[in-house]
Image: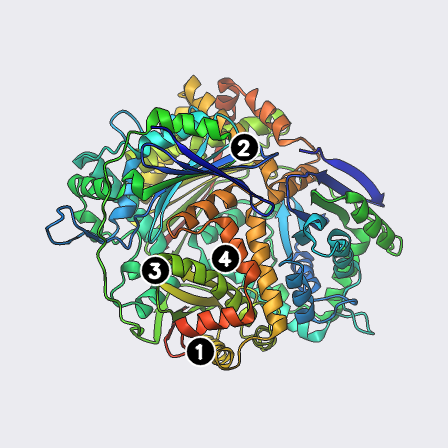
Amino acid sequence: MSCQIEKAESRRFGTLYRIKHPSGLSILVSPMKGFASSYALFGTAYGSIDTLIKTDEDGDFIKLPEGIAHYLEHKLFESEECSAFDRYAKTGASANAFTAFDRTAYLFSCSDNFSESLEILLDFVTHPYFTAETVAKEQGIIGQEIRMYDDSADWRVLFNLLCALYSKNPVRIDIAGTQESISHITAELLYKCYNKFYNLHNMVLAVAGNVDVDEVIAVADKILKPAEPFFLERGTCDEPDEVVKHYVEQHLPVSVPMFNIGFKGKAGTEKENFVGSVLDEIFLDALFDDYTEVYRRLYDEGIINSTFGSEVFGGRDYISLMISGESREPQKVCDAVRTEFANALENGISAEAFECAQKSVYGRYLRSTERAEGVATMLFNGYFPGVEPEELMDIAASATPESVMERVRSTYSVENYALSVIKP
Amino acid sequence: MGKLIRKKIGDEVYLNSVRDEKFKSDRITVNFITPLDRKDVTVNALVPFVLRKGCKSCPDFTELNKRLAKMYGAILDADASKQGGSQIVEVLLQLADDKFAINGEKMVEEGAKLLADLVFDPNLDENGLFPEKDLELEREYLIDTINSDLNDKRTYAVHKAVEMEFEGEPFGISRYGYVEDAEKITGEELAAAWRRLIKTARIEIMFVGPGDPAAIEQVFAKRLETVEREPIPVEKAPLVPYKELKSAEEAMDIVQGKLVMGFRMGAPATEREKNAARVLSAIYGGTPFSKLFMNVREKMSLCYYATSHFERGTGVMFVDCGIEFASRDAAQAEILRQLDCICNGEITDEELASTKLIMKNSLGTVGDFLSGLDNWYMTCILDDLILTPEEDAAEIDKITIEEVVAMAKRAKLSTVFFLKGGEAE
């Protein structure tokens, strides 16, 4: 059996090869002319929100210890002989990994020895090795990582908000777990999770920059074994539409209070969330970016500063709008934001604000495409929802004030909000 | 990738350009370089914050931001930074290149004109002062920026260690200045600071992107004809080999301790010595197979990060890690022990080869980022040594184990700062 390869060209995005490898893995390759470096992301649709696992099709779901996906990510770097970092040391690649809410990715960037580095990446991620000793060793390291985030106001203002917005969805759980929860992680559980979620049919490899598609396929041919047939039943959480509470605050040593305002949306399918998030981005920009009336008013009153910004927080089964920054009067900011929101829901957005927002959002995507990391990330992020970068940019380019408002009105409301504050 | 072309376009005014077709945006930065001075640092840091608000040709902040948004979200940033003994006031514009303009607009030329307006023709009133409102708001924001170090505990601890290490030297002057000075800045002082920068600072304009630098040269050369210049040369501040060992602790309501240690490297004078120090720092704590990563993190499980970083501009190497409060002594001892190991020659050929490989690989990626090229060449210019990243990689390759060990033996612990938990005293 050989690879199925499709090639697509676009002026905006460039060249894209879509490959269905006989092992079961989907591979996306975007060669970028003139670039010296390459960037590769190899990841799975498994993250911190996957707290339930069913290893026996007829059995019940088992609840996993919080932070296990992240723990697994750390441990995957180790094998019986050595660590993946020891291997990368011979190729000079800069390697890393991250665990997000609904995905985990292993990556590297390099300007030389690409094939060798890709071999290492595909090999170590597809060869797990977990023992009681190696699991025990990581407790201290991850324990310190957790502590580091506990002291981080940025991190806490977000997670406190998530707890205020979501009562059941595991997105409210800290990605690394707690020192207590990770103490329950065993090698056996890691293998269970690995075998369930790290099936090539549930994964994708995205590569961009100074790359040759035949080289990529050759490495995949060399390393990857055909994957087992894949069937995954994910646990559901029955999250209510309403928020848990409207206000949460925590005291941490910060100089100026930080706030994060969230509007909880009605989540659709993963694809609907992803597509909708583009229109949501335009909406947020049109209301709150630095050329808007409300920004100017709050800025001139000294209530916000240039840390004020917004983003769409979306994923597999959750989506929210978030507006954050520093302020000595977070409640005033929240009131102003909600008033603006209500006004927009009622009266729509102005043509000029829409033009500014659409062009800004489109420009951001365009800027991503002039970095290998940006291209690989766009490919990776869009794969599981089933949306390619070209389509993403099309959605931004073809949006209208009406399509934006239709999306926002059917997804969000002014009442479904929460304000999270970190103050000294 | 195009090479850097450096052209003098005024009295101590230079246009530096790297033309590169592979990018879709152009990036132009105007940098004012002046010596770091306790007297002026704060008011100088305030200048970019007010320049960002508008200019004579576009005095309204909201209108300015609208204009940028319509240019496909052009980025306008203004900031103050420092390198070695210099303060740098920077205004940056990054925008989509002409080849993406829908109606054939000359985006790059327009962008250059806007940038020149913001820098050379700000929104001054009939008394030659910045708008009172901007002075008030941006002064507050400068104060908040100075204090915001506190928010990231790692940054805060490193900053305290740097202050301690360089007390009495220009390197110890805070990047954004001091709250007590910021509070007192008047409109006259701010306007005078701007005038002083325009008149006396060295001006380095950096351009990176696919566009034609000729357009930018024309815009700025023309503008400079109306600017009176009396530049003051920027001299490199001397490196002090060693003073004394200083140690301090601070308590804060936190759960993870931050340990920062500074080592004077005996004032490395030549490029070769500085490169030896860079390689040493990478072997010691700059990679995922470094001494600190493999021992303090992997073997002893004491931390999530333990890294070292050598500063070319100051000749000091800093180590920092996040640990349990109770692990402080063990971590500090191990950090010192690993340096001793290096002094004893415990570096394998493989370690050296791998470290150089990752450093060279990293240098090979610089040319793929607009910001990478901008920052790279600005650092070179301030260092008075212009090399391409590839040429630098070739220099790194020359360093031997003996040179690394010799540099390690020059390291003298001079600062230890520990941010711990508990009630602030």
Q: Where residue B183 appears, x then y in whole percent? A: 62, 69
First in sequence: mark 1 vs mark 3: 3
Residue behind mark 3: A269
Relative to residue A106, is residue B219 drawn left or right?
A: right
Q: Do labels 1 and 3 share a chain?
A: yes
Relative to residue A74, is residue B150 drawn left or right?
A: right
| Circle number at residue A331 | 1
Separation of marks 1 and 2 at Cα, in angstroms: 49 Å
Task: Tell me if residue B39 comes above or below residue A11 in the rendering.
Answer: below
Query: What kind of element bears circle 4?
Result: helix
**Badge 1, how many Cα within 10 Å: few under 14, some, many 20+?**
some
Residue behind mark 4: B149
Q: Are marks 3 and 4 on the same chain?
A: no
The C terminus of chain B - image quarter = bottom left
First in sequence: mark 1 vs mark 2: 2
Q: What residue type is labelled 1?
A: Gln
Relative depth, front residue between B311 and B328 = B311
**Badge 3, how many Cα within 10 Å: few under 14, some, many 20+?**
few
Q: Do the residues labelled 2 and 4 touch (CB within 8 Å)?
A: no
Query: What kind of element bears circle 2?
Result: loop
Q: Residue at x 36, y 33 (%)?
A: A21
Query: What kind of element bears circle 3?
Result: loop
Residue behind mark 2: A210
Which marked residue is nearer to the observer: mark 1 or mark 2? 2
Which marked residue is nearer to the observer: mark 3 or mark 4? 3
Observer able to see residue B84? no
Which marked residue is nearer to the observer: mark 1 or mark 3? 3
Query: What kind of element bears circle 1?
Result: helix
Label 2 marks a residue whose chain is: A
Q: What residue type is labelled 3?
A: Thr
Q: In which quarter of the image is residue A189?
A: top left
